[in-house]
Image: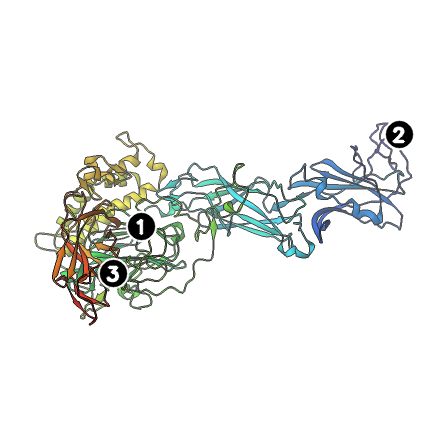
Amino acid sequence: MRILFYYICIFNVGKSVANSGSADVCADGQSSETGMAPGCSDNYPHVVLTPKVVTDLADGIQIRKFTTLEPVFKCVFDEMIDSLKLVFDIHWYINNDLVVVNMNIAQGKLFDTHMRPHHWTTTYSMNMQVKCSVRARLGPNETPSPFFESEEITAGVISDLHLNSFVEVTEGKAATIKLRSTVPVGCFSKNLQSQCNHTMHIRQISYNYNSNRCINNLQTGDLAIETEFCGITIPSIGWDNTLDLKVTGYVNNLYDEQKTRTATIHFTSLVRNNVDISGTWNRVDIPDLKVRITDADHKLSGRACLAFTLSNFVTIYGDEYSFQGAGEYVLYRHKTLPYSVHILQTAIKSSSTGICGIAVRSVNSIFVLRTCNTISQYFSNQNVLTVPVVQYKQCNDNDMTIQETGSGYKIHLPSGTEITFQYERYWIKSILVKPSVLDDGLVNGLCGNIANKESISTSWRVSDALQQLFIEKPQNQTALRPPQQYCTCKKEAGPTDDPSILKFEFVQCDLSQPIDVYSCQHPNQVNEYIIDECTLSRNRRSVVNRNIPTLDDIKEVIPLTYDSSFNPNYIPQEPSWPEMWSKYQAQVFCENYTSSMEIVRLCRQYSSFNVDTFTEGCMKDIKHGGNTNYVEWIVGVIKDYCFVELSRNATSMSRTTENGKTLYYELLYAFCPTGCRHWRNCVNGKCIECDSNDFIGHDCLALKSEPPKDIVLAGNGSCNTRQRPCLKTDIYGEFKSTLLYCKLSRFKITVNGIVQNETSNIWPGEYNSAHSISCQFPRQPRNRPTTELAVGYIISIAYDREHFGDNVSIVIYDENCVTCEVSTLTCNVVVSNYDLNPL
């Protein structure tokens, strides 16, 4: 067979061309090699052919003992016509370019006319338009019939979308795009076809200015793709099966004034396919898929769950109520996702309760802060803790992020739900749960729809030990982690990047929800108190870099108890107005108090802020508390509420206020504590660098020269070398700066009494959290005199390396040899063969 490559003009396609009056065109019923004179004749096969382009796999080249499979294009038609011994010309076109010409091919040799990869891969890319045309001859080089042309096919990957149409999605909702390959994937061996496939990699291109920024410590975006990696895989077996590409509107937690934004999905092949060596899939030019995303966050404007001061509550639907029950209650619980928030309430007055604990659960990761040790309907100073208990177990890096805010914590769940709370020594002053789109209509608990306020105590009280979160070892949930996995796919390899695609396949993947709360840097992010990965243990926490935890990293937990007379159904009676107060007087006071706040003015002007909610709470606090002592707690929750509302409206935040400054600037300034404003060291509403002056603390009002007080040593100052290395100790208290110093004065307990060193060592302390630091000990000598029963250190802490606070003592000993009493700094020998003779 001889294949000729030449340019040919084709005028008769699919039927004879009528005589248009031109002398050069063959008359009706005649044909020629070119369809024009000279050479016109009626001696040609008068047949009608209906060619069709079909793709298939065929044997390719032989490599050692393997026969490869390669994709081919076949021009298929009814070739047995009236038993005539015809020969055929078959031409192949790509994008209307003539690519392959086959002449005088006998019926039994048509397989030689397949268009194979080597015919086109160096010039064309996939998603090209392919067609074939065929004509018949009575014999080789006889007069041919007119050409009959097939329909064009798109050779590559096609979708079910119309050209230039958009996929429509809403934030948090999904749409499915149907994709199908029209060309097979080859294989390096026909016997190993199950191991062969081709991957098309995906990235999204955004036309939204905010699409790749961190706003409010969250990564913004447009789309999340429900997939395990940024791509689609086409198998060699089943290559023509439909592939579902599920795209979801990315939840960005911003109130978008434009309501819609657009993005495109781009496909690319970055490396040579090593399993299909034909080169067919090396270059693929799939048209971008256009997606229009409709904002849903604006529906949550003004909606938040609040729990503040003396057990005042506001649901995410805006219902206000007061609930004075004591015990553990569900504040927030998602109906379908494994996220929940519990609170503890105990008596703060004879007629009211306060919040003394919060527990946030995401799957089986839990963060707990508790300021009380006993739950009771009767208040006692012995029921509260001088240092809060903080527990944090993390089973998965993506379960939650936690930030210290100076006066509390801010927690982000994978759903985008944000929990902010503030506390002081004995009480949690306020809790704010800001829902995301993924919470809408799916929240219950005290934050949910409270149809019957009389049944709150029984409906949301947590009495089952399997559900309680404030016990030492909460039960793991049986609910599995959400099965979906999302990728945002906003990064791709560039021309100078490593050609290995693996590091780009999983860009911003492993998201359990269509929102990324992990990629942005969270200031003051909490990494400590990660307790034994996924097993809550009171004696161990892992270090920040998740190396194997040391035994010196201990975390003591004072267990929660319930008063012997505790009645879970007891609700105190509504009190009368205290002396010198009336409802009217309280209302006037509270209205004046709240309206005088600058943050309230900004909120009322630029958001759907309802100050009446906080005025009512203020009035209830006066009635239940008997005075205005708790009113100042309202300031914190108002600030948190206003900030979360205003900061989510990007358009409003960029507006210019009456003072000629942006609302964002004024809002942050209004958030700055008084001390920060004085020192002008406020960034993003938080104090910074006040350590460079003489003041410290989240409000820059504490003197650096005033050291921490009432500090407590882990293990009550007893360190047994049989149980842990005793190379450092944790110290609990209230710490107002991340920069601290430990002064260590070493002493020895001998058979003759205490011997103390004349000099002290000062070492930088290790800040763990606002209530925990660590002090490192100098390395101990291996050989000690046998008269030495134990060693220890007198420890004190300073912020400025000069003014040290209270002394506490730690004793380091071997329990196999001695027993020691820290309070008296004495030890007793416990083995008869202990050598007491001096060296």
Amino acid of disc 1: Val
Q: CA distance from mark 2 to mark 3?
A: 103 Å
User: Counting residues from the N terminus, which is met first, the one under dot 2 or under dot 3?
Assistant: 2
At numbered mark 1, what does the secondary structure look like: helix, strand or loop? loop
Q: Is residue 612 above or below residue 194?
A: above
Taking depth in this image into account, of 713 and 166 the one nearest to the observer is 713
Q: Residue at x 21, y 46 (%)?
A: 740
Instruction: Write down the residue under mark 3.
Output: 556
Whether residue 516 sits left or right of residue 279 in the image: it is left
- Which is more N-terminal, label 3 or label 1? 1
Residue appearing at x 85%, y 40% in the figure = 145
Residue at image mark 2: 38
Q: Name the residue at the top extreme.
A: 23
Q: Which secondary structure lies at badge 2? A: loop
Residue 67's spot in the image, x, y percent? Answer: 71, 52
- Where does the image place residue 499, in percent across and percent down from the top left? 55, 42
Disc 1 to disc 3: CB gap under 8 Å: no
Disc 2 crowd rating (10 Å Cα; few below 14, some 14-19, many 20+) is some
Q: Nearer the viewer, residue 733 or 81?
A: 733
Name which residue lies at 75% across and 40% down. Answer: 92
Question: 714 left or right of 549?
Answer: left
Query: What quarter of the picture does the N terminus occupy?
Result: top right
- Give neighbour class at mark 3: few <14, some 14-19, many 20+ (Cα, 10 Å): some
Q: CA distance from mark 1 to mark 3?
A: 18 Å
Q: Nearer the viewer, mark 1 or mark 3?
A: 3
**What amino acid type is highlighted by mark number 2?**
Pro
The numbered mark, 1 or 2, whose residue comes first in the sequence reads: 2
Residue 64's place in the image compared with 821, above or below, is above
Which quadrant does the C terminus fall into?
bottom left
Quadrant hosting residue 696? top left
Kindly identify which residue carries mark 1.
526
